[in-house]
Image (cartoon, grey):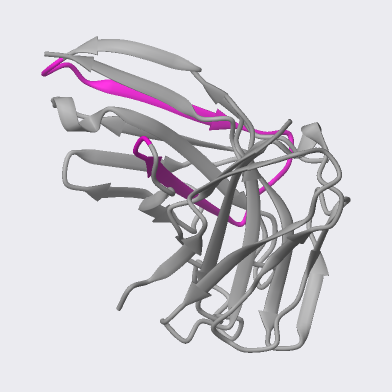
Amino acid sequence: NAGVTQTPKFRILKIGQSMTLQCTQDMNHNYMYWYRQDPGMGLKLIYYSVGAGITDKGEVPNGYNVSRSTTEDFPLRLELAAPSQTSVYFCASSYDLSRDRDSYNEQFFGPGTRLTVL
Amino acid sequence: GQQLNQSPQSMFIQEGEDVSMNCTSSSIFNTWLWYKQDPGEGPVLLIALYKAGELTSNGRLTAQFGITRKDSFLNISASIPSDVGIYFCAGQLAPGTYKYIFGTGTRLKVLA
């Protein structure tokens, strides 16, 4: 298993450009997440999905869009890139353990995409 | 929104020393997770805690779920150079939500 893969690893955008960050997992996980990590900070949840066709906003969704047409893929779209979106973006996935109240939900992270908007 | 305060922010230690770091919040959490992030990589889960007062070990790592459910501690014994990295705590607010609040991280540097 490759786990969670992300492309590209690095990207530089000009203000106003658009792009899609790709994320794929081969573990048949129901749940997928997008986080951003700013320098010296923790991870902030942008969007998440509990299954194909279902997405929901996290803490910092403004300026982003997502879709989940398959279990494996969860792309993140930036429509009008702004300097405030300069960050490292991590995709993650996890099992659905909602029937087990005492369980935790380990998230497996991809290697990240480092995005700079100039 | 909820915040997790992690301390210290960074630390330099000598190889062989023990390390302690903690995570506190004003909110009650259902689950605490501790992750390690190596440079240029995504976080990797180290230890999961899901009962108040629980003490769990993973090799040289030991973590505790605070009895008030508002804090957690991670200890690393006999540190080695490969312990270098950023350690994050993450708290799950309620079972079934699968949304976690992450701390700001403790950056650990080990001097050989």
How far across and how far down the image is residue A16, in percent?
A: 86, 44
Residue B86 lies left or right of residue A101; in this view the side is left
Q: Is residue A107 visible?
A: no
Residue A95 lies left or right of residue B19; in this view the side is right
**A112 is higher (above) or lower (below) than A88:** below
Residue B75 lies left or right of residue B100; in this view the side is left
How far across and how far down the image is residue A2, in percent?
A: 33, 73
How far across and how far down the image is residue A29, in percent?
A: 51, 81
- Depth check: give the residue in front, B15 or A53: A53
**B68 is higher (above) or lower (below) than B84:** below
- The quarter of the image holding the N terminus of chain A is bottom left
Q: Quadrant of residue A84?
A: top right
- Is residue B35 a member of the stretch shown in magenta? yes
Q: Is residue B90 visible?
A: yes
- The quarter of the image holding the C terminus of chain A is top right
The residue under the point 66% across, 73% down is: B96
The part of the chain drawn in magenta is B15-39
How far across and how far down the image is residue A66, in percent?
A: 76, 69
- Is residue A30 a member of the stretch shown in magenta? no
